[in-house]
C-alpha cells in the first residue's frame, strides 16, 4: 500500500517522503476566500461524562473556520492531528485507501490578515456541524472550510466516545465505544447537551475571539444554524427543538430519532438523502415530514452513498485513486466524482444557510438545481 502512494508521489514529481509531502485539499465554491482554522478543547464543569462513568467533567473538541478576504500569511496544516491521522489510516486501509493517506493531506490555513486590525465579524452568521457516529469531526473539515469560505463562521464538534477517536491538544485520545440501538437515544441526548454547552460558550465574545482570532467579536451570538451528517443530522433536529435561537437545521442522510418525530419543528429544516434514501425508504423521514411546520425541502442525490457527504470522495479524487478503489467502496462513497460531489454538497449547504441566515430567498437553490442534474427534489 505504502509503495503505491510513494509511486504516486514520484509520478507527480514529489521527491520528498510521504511524511513531508502534502496533498492540499482545495476550497470549492463561488468567490471563495481564504480561511483561518483553529482547534481547542472545551470542558463543561457543570456536567459529568456519562460515557466515562468516572465522574470526570465532559470535555469536547471543536475546530473553528473563519473566512479571511485579505490574507497576508498562511501555511499548510495537517488535515488531521497526528494520532488521529494514524488511526484513520489504519481504519480506512480496510476500504482500500493506501496506508499513509490521511497523514499526507493538508488544509491551507490563514494565520494573519493584511489589514492591521482584525475585521469585524458583525455580519457573519454562525454554523455548528455535528458528524456521523464513529466518525471524527476532521473527516468533514475540507467541506467545512469551503462553507466558511462562502462567508460563515463554522464550528465542528467531536462528541467523545461516540466519535471513533478524539485527540486533545495535550496529545491524549479518547477512542469510541460501541453504541447499540438501545443506547442511541442517550447518545443523542449527550450530543444535544454538547451542542447546548457549545452555544453557551460561544455566547461569550472571548471564546469567539479564541476560535476565530482574525476577527473582532462583540455582543451576543450571531444568527446561527446547525448542520449534521447521519446521526449528526438527527442531533441537528434535536438541538433545534431544545434551543430556540437556532434558526434552521440541515440533516444530511441521517435517520431521525427522539421526540422530534412527534413534536416536529417550527423553523426551516432540510433533508438531503443519498440515492434511494427518501421518505419512501426511511420511515423516520416519512413520520417527521408532516411535523415540519416551517420551510422544508427534501432532496435526493442520485449516485451518492452515505459517506458521499464527507470529505472521503474528494480525498480519493485528490490523491488520484477514485477510479482505482474496489467496487465495495462505491457502495459507501458513491459514484459521483469527488470534486463534483464536494461542490454539490457545499452548494446545497450554503444555499440553505444563505436562505436561513442571510436573505430568506430560495434563489440559490434555483441555480444549484440547474447545475446538479444528480439532484431530485423529492418534496
Ligand atoms: C500503517 O503503517 C503504519 C506505519 O507507518 C503501521 O504501523 C501500521 O500497521 C500500518 N497499518 C496497516 C493497516 O497496514
Ligand atoms: C488532557 O486533556 C484532556 C481533555 O482536556 C483531559 O481530560 C486529560 O486529563 C488531559 N491529560 C493530561 C495527561 O493532562
Ligand atoms: C446495549 O449495551 C448496554 C451497555 O453495554 C447493555 O447494557 C444493553 O443490554 C445492550 N442492549 C442491547 C439491546 O444489546
Ligand atoms: C435505487 O432503486 C432503484 C430502483 O429500485 C435501483 O435500480 C437502484 O439500484 C437503487 N440504487 C441504489 C443506490 O440502491
Ligand atoms: C453553476 O455552474 C456555473 C458554470 O460552471 C458556475 O459558474 C456557477 O457558479 C455554478 N453555480 C452554482 C450555484 O454552483
Image: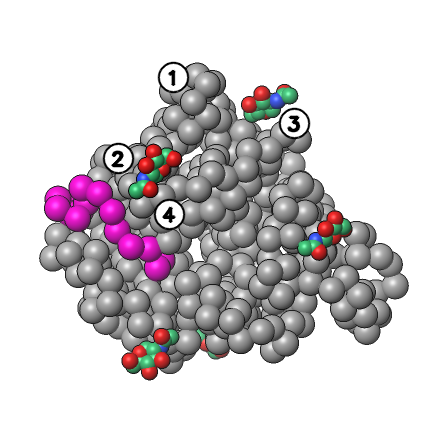
Per the image, label 3 sits on a secondary structure element best described as loop
Quadrant where the N terminus is found in the figure: bottom right
Which mark is nearer the camera, 4 or 2?
A: 4
Q: Residues within 10 Å of mark 3 (few under 14, many from 20)?
A: few
Residue 200 in magenta? no
Which circle's residue, 1 or 3, is located before the other in the chain? 1
- The quadrant where ligand 3 appears is top left
Within the image, what quadrant is residue 370 found in? bottom left
Which circle's residue, 4 or 3, is located before the other in the chain? 3
Label 3 near label 1: C-beta < 8 Å?
no
**CB at disc 2 and ligand 2 closer than 8 Å:** no
Return the residue nearer the eye: 332 or 278: 332
Give the residue pinned by disc 2: 243
Q: In this rendering, would 228 be left or right of 83?
A: left
Which circle's residue, 4 or 2, is located before the other in the chain? 4
Residue, x 39% and y 26% (percent of image)? 50
Label 4 to label 2: alpha-carbon separation: 16 Å
Per the image, label 4 sits on a secondary structure element best described as helix
Residue, x 21% and y 56% (percent of image)? 284
Give the residue pinned by disc 4: 232
| Rendering colour mode | one colour
Q: Please give the range of residues in magenta.
A: 252-266
Q: Residue 46 bears which disc, if any?
A: 1
Residue 356 visible in this rendered orientation of the protein: no
Label 2 to label 3: alpha-carbon separation: 32 Å
Residue 259 in magenta? yes
Quadrant where the C terminus is found in the figure: bottom left
Amino acid at each position: 500500500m505504502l509503495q503505491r502512494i510513494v509511486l504516486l508521489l514520484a509520478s507527480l514529481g514529489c521527491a520528498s517522503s510521504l511524511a513531508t509531502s502534502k496533498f492540499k485539499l482545495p476550497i470549492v465554491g463561488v468567490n471563495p476566500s481564504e480561511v483561518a482554522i483553529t482547534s481547542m478543547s472545551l470542558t463543561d464543569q457543570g456536567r459529568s461524562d456519562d460515557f466515562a462513568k468516572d465522574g470526570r467533567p465532559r470535555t469536547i473538541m471543536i475546530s473553528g473556520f473563519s473566512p479571511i478576504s485579505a490574507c497576508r500569511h498562511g501555511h499548510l496544516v495537517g488535515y488531521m492531528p497526528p494520532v488521529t491521522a494514524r488511526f484513520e489510516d489504519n481504519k480506512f486501509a480496510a476500504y482500500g485507501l493506501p496506508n499513509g493517506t490521511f497523514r499526507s493531506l493538508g488544509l491551507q490555513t490563514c494565520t494573519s490578515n493584511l489589514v492591521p486590525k482584525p475585521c469585524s465579524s458583525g455580519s457573519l452568521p454562525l454554523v455548528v456541524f455535528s458528524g456521523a457516529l464513529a466518525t471524527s469531526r476532521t473527516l468533514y473539515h475540507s467541506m467545512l472550510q469551503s462553507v466558511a469560505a462562502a462567508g460563515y463562521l463554522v464550528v465542528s464538534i467531536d462528541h467523545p466516545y461516540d466519535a471513533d477517536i478524539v485527540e486533545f491538544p495535550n496529545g491524549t485520545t479518547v477512542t469510541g465505544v460501541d453504541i447499540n440501538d438501545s443506547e442511541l437515544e442517550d447518545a443523542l441526548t449527550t450530543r444535544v447537551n454538547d451542542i447546548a454547552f457549545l452555544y453557551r460558550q460561544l455566547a461569550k465574545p472571548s471564546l469567539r475571539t479564541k476560535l476565530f482570532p482574525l476577527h473582532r467579536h462583540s455582543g451576543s451570538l450571531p444568527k446561527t444554524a446547525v448542520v449534521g451528517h447521519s446521526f449528526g443530522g438527527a442531533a441537528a433536529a434535536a438541538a433545534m427543538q431544545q434551543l430556540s435561537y437556532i434558526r434552521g437545521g440541515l440533516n444530511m442522510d441521517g435517520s431521525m430519532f427522539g421526540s422530534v418525530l412527534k413534536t416536529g419543528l417550527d423553523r426551516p429544516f432540510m433533508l438531503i438523502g443519498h440515492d434511494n434514501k427518501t421518505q419512501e425508504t426511511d420511515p423516520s423521514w416519512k413520520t417527521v415530514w408532516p411535523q415540519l411546520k416551517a420551510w422544508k425541502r427534501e432532496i435526493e442525490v442520485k449516485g451518492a452513498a452515505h459517506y458521499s457527504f464527507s470529505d472521503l470522495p474528494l480525498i480519493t479524487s485528490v490523491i488520484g485513486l477514485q477510479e482505482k478503489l474496489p467496487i465495495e467502496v462505491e457502495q459507501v462513497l458513491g459514484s459521483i466524482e469527488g470534486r463534483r460531489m464536494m461542490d454539490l454538497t457545499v452548494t446545497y449547504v450554503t444555499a440553505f444557510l444563505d436562505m436561513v441566515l442571510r436573505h430568506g430567498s430560495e434563489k440559490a437553490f434555483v441555480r444549484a438545481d440547474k447545475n446538479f442534474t444528480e439532484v431530485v427534489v423529492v418534496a
